[in-house]
Structure formats: structure tokens, C-alpha cells
Image (spheres, grey):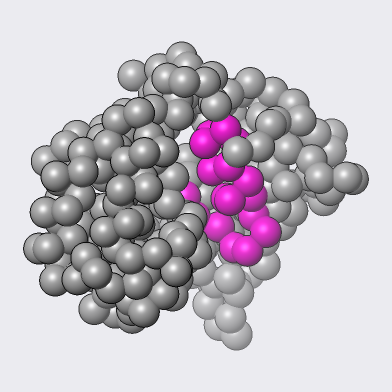
């Protein structure tokens, strides 16, 4: 089952499209990384899925057929924003009790137990907690709702390395213990490589590539060869990104590896997730490519230098 499914989903603010022609399926039971630069449409997509914004165009279903913002969706989705939406003047204890009163299903004993395990005093005011402790408290509130899907918008942005490690360890424990599907928006590519098994790359408000991490890595190659041979590669292979140096060129290409016509003089290397993501993020704006302005680049249709 797909936990999120969209068809030509779009969101416009005034004359500016924050998200456009977004068609994707995010499977249940995965840790899905939502990756892209600032302004790529990541937060907009999360807000649409959470029911915090209405789409301008297209269709969107969550949790296998529910409408965003419906009672089923509200009960089944927990959303943790980047700024850890907590009341700074409340104590930790009062924050948990407030969350219990605002949600139809909230496991207060679990939340209180988790806070104790984290060494956070229930009497302390939220505003006096460290950034890592506030992030853990927000995560505790989300987990105590027992959601089917948890969405995290840049939760690591303001955390130090130790707090980031502890936060991601808690997320992975929740996935293992409670079978929670996670959609995680982040810029920290190195850490995403360790936890994500599904990925969606957004740029210029459009989906550049999406799929299972292992499948995408297996389906891409890095070629190194002479600069004067780039054109020949572009004619034979679906090139995602080209980087040209003084004596060598580096090409990220999408190919299954079976029967691919690699020109002579080129070396073939495997590719890591971080290198794959960066290649797609360096693609030009789809609206600047040849063809209809509303078309969506499918895979490596665009080449950047």
C-alpha cells in the first residue's frame, strides 16, 4: 500500500508555483527521505500531505485512500515542523497533558516514560530545554499519538552532531518497534544515506527522481573519460549530469548496465546516494528545458554542466 499518492499535484502562491506536476507514490513501511534545496517545495508537499494547505491542482491521497485533513488522516499522521512547535512557557508535564487533551488518541504513560528515559525533568519549562531536548520532546508527542505515518520537516537543522545522532536513533527505533512510516525532509545527505530506504528528490518545485534507494543506486553509473567524448556519451546514454574538467569529464548516467553502449575510453564506476542526489539537484529548472513548460522531466531528461 502507498502511504502517500499524488497525481499532478500543484500548489501556487500568487503567481509562483511552490510545487508543480508532482506525481509520486511513497510506499508504506519505509523511511522516505525528501531532499532538495531551499525553495524546492519540500515543506509545501509536507503541508499538503498533512492537510495544512489545500492544493491548487491535482490529486492527493494519504494512508491508502484518505483525504488530507479528514478525521482518518488527522488521527493517522503526525507532523513535526522544523521549529519543534511547543509552548515554551509550559512545563514538560503540562505540554504532555495538553497534547493528550488535543488528540483523540494519545498514549500519555508512554510519553511520560520516554521523557524520563531521556533524562528530561517533567517540571522544567520547555523554553529552558536544549535544542536536542526540545526536538526529542516534539518527537515524543508525535510518537505518543501512535501514528501510521510521521512527517519530519528538517528536524536536524538546529541540532549538534550528538543530538542529531540521538534523534535519528529514536526515529529508527520507532520504525522498528511501532511499524511507523516516516517521511523525513533534510539537507544532511550523509545521515540520510544511513537511514533512508526510499527517496524523493525535489528541485524547482518538481520531482526530479523518486524510488527505492537500492534500485536507484543500481540503476546509475559514474563515467570518467575524455572531455572530447562527452557528446558521444550523450547520444548513446541517458545522462543526468556532466562535470567537465581540464582533461577529464565525469558523467552521471542512468542505465541498468545490461547492453549499455559505453563508448571506448570511458571508465565505469558505481555511485553513492549522495553523489546521485547531487547530480539530480544540479539539473536545470524544468521550465527552462525544451518542450512544453508544464511537462515534467522523467529521470535524466535534463543535462547540466
Q: Reply above or below: 292 against 191.
A: above
17, above or below 137, in the image: above
What percent of the width, then of the height, locates residue 286?
Answer: 74, 47
Quadrant in the picture for residue 6: top right
Per the image, is 39 magenta?
Answer: yes
Q: Residue shown at 63%/21% (left/top)?
A: 59
For the residue pair 11 and 289, the one nearer the viewer reads as: 11
Foreground of the two, 154 or 2: 154
Closer to the camera in the image, 3 or 285: 3
Q: Note whether 216 is above or below 157 in the view shown.
A: above
Q: Which residues are magenta?
A: 31-51
* Image location (x, y in percent) of residue 142: 33, 46
What residue is at 52 percent from the left and 30 percent from the top? 24
Horizontal side, residue 249 vs residue 190: left or right: right
Does residue 52 belong to the magenta stretch? no
Placement of the N terminus among the 4 image quadrants: top left
Q: How many marks?
A: 0
Residue 191 image position (x, y, % from top left): 31, 66
Tell which of 169 and 267 is nearer to you: 169
> What residue is at 24 percent from the left and 78 percent from the top?
162
Residue 25 spot, x, y in % from top left? 46, 28
User: For the C terminus, which image quadrant?
Assistant: bottom right
Asked which quadrant contains residue 107, the reply is top left
Amino acid at each position: 500500500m502507498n502511504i502517500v499518492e499524488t497525481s499532478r499535484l500543484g500548489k501556487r502562491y500568487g503567481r509562483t508555483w511552490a510545487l508543480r506536476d508532482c506525481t509520486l507514490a511513497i510506499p508504506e513501511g519505509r523511511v522516505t527521505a525528501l531532499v532538495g534545496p531551499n525553495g524546492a517545495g519540500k515543506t509545501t508537499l509536507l503541508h499538503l500531505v498533512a492537510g495544512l494547505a489545500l492544493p491548487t491542482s491535482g490529486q492527493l491521497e494519504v494512508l491508502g485512500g484518505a483525504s488530507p485533513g479528514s478525521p482518518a488522516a488527522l488521527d493517522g499522521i503526525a507532523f513535526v515542523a522544523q521549529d519543534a512547535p511547543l509552548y515554551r512557557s509550559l512545563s514538560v508535564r503540562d505540554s504532555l497533558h495538553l497534547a493528550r487533551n488535543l488528540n483523540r488518541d494519545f498514549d500519555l504513560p508512554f510519553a511520560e516514560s520516554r521523557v524520563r528515559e531521556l533524562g528530561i525533568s517533567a517540571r522544567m519549562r520547555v523554553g529552558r530545554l536544549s535544542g536536542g531536548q526540545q526536538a526529542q520532546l516534539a518527537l515524543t508527542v508525535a510518537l505518543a499519538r501512535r501514528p501510521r505515518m510521521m512527517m519530519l520537516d528538517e528536524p536536524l537543522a538546529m541540532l549538534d552532531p550528538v543530538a542529531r545522532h540521538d534523534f535519528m536513533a529514536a526515529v529508527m527505533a520507532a520504525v522498528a518497534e511501532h511499524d511507523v512510516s516516516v517521511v523525513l525532509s533534510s539537507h544532511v545527505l550523509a545521515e540520510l544515506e544511513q537511514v533512508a530506504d526510499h527517496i524523493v528528490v525535489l528541485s524547482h518545485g518538481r520531482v526530479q527522481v523518486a524510488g527505492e534507494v537500492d534500485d536507484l543506486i543500481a540503476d546509475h553509473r559514474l563515467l570518467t573519460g575524455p572531455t572530447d567524448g562527452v557528446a558521444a556519451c550523450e547520444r548513446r546514454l541517458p545522462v543526468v549530469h556532466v562535470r567537465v574538467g581540464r582533461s577529464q569529464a565525469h558523467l552521471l548516467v542512468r542505465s541498468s548496465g545490461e547492453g549499455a553502449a559505453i563508448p571506448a575510453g570511458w571508465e565505469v564506476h558505481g555511485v553513492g546516494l549522495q553523489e546521485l542526489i547531487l547530480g539530480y539537484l544540479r539539473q536545470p529548472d524544468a521550465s527552462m528545458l525544451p518542450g512544453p513548460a508544464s511537462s515534467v522531466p522523467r529521470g535524466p531528461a535534463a543535462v547540466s554542466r
